[in-house]
Image (cartoon, grey):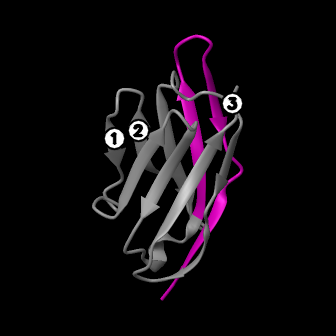
Amino acid sequence: QVQLVESGGGLVQAGGSLRLSCAASQSIFSINVMAWYRRAPGKQRELVATKTSDGSTNYADSVKGRFTISRDNAKNTVYLQMINLKPEDTAVYYCNAHKWTLPAFRSWGQGTQVTVSS
């Protein structure tokens, strides 16, 4: 298993930007998918963005064009750059690592709060 620690959350006004970081306790080079999820108050957890080990990315429709996921394998870190933030982006953001090649595992970070004021 890999331990994940998110940082970079905070309070920002609508239209502002934040960059979230997810630091892994070990190499993420062989992890098949690194992802960001979020859970807004009273809502189910939502997949925000994914980046595979071969570089493919995928985004939720609600964040396309505003969020960018990147992974720096040398630093064992995944980022989520968020621009033009909206109040509906307010949520706890979680980093996720999913490795299905052996040894397989799925790990979650503790989350970081993002609050966007109108």
Specify few, some or many for label 2: CA neighbours under 10 Å numbering under 14, 14-19, or 20 or more: many
Q: Which quarter of the image is occupied by the N terminus?
A: top right
Q: Which x, y percent locates residue 40?
A: 57, 65
Specify few, some or many for label 3: CA neighbours under 10 Å numbering under 14, 14-19, or 20 or more: some
Q: Using the image, determine if residue 53 lies above or below residue 21.
A: above
Q: Which of marks 2 and 1 is nearer the N terminus?
A: 2
CA gap between label 2 and label 3 equals 17 Å
Give the magenta-colored segment's residue range. 92-118
CA gap between label 1 and label 3 equals 21 Å
Specify few, some or many for label 1: CA neighbours under 10 Å numbering under 14, 14-19, or 20 or more: some
Q: Which x, y percent locates residue 58?
A: 33, 43
Q: What element carries label 1?
A: strand
Residue placed under numbered mark 1 in the picture: 57
Nearer to us in this view, 72 or 86: 72
**In the shown orientation, is residue 78 left or right of residue 109?**
left
Residue placed under numbered mark 3 in the picture: 2
Q: Are marks 2 and 1 in contact (CB under 8 Å)?
A: yes
Q: What residue type is labelled 1?
A: Thr
Residue 31 visible somewhere in the drawing: yes
Q: Using the image, determine if residue 117 lies above or below residue 96.
A: below
Residue placed under numbered mark 2 in the picture: 51
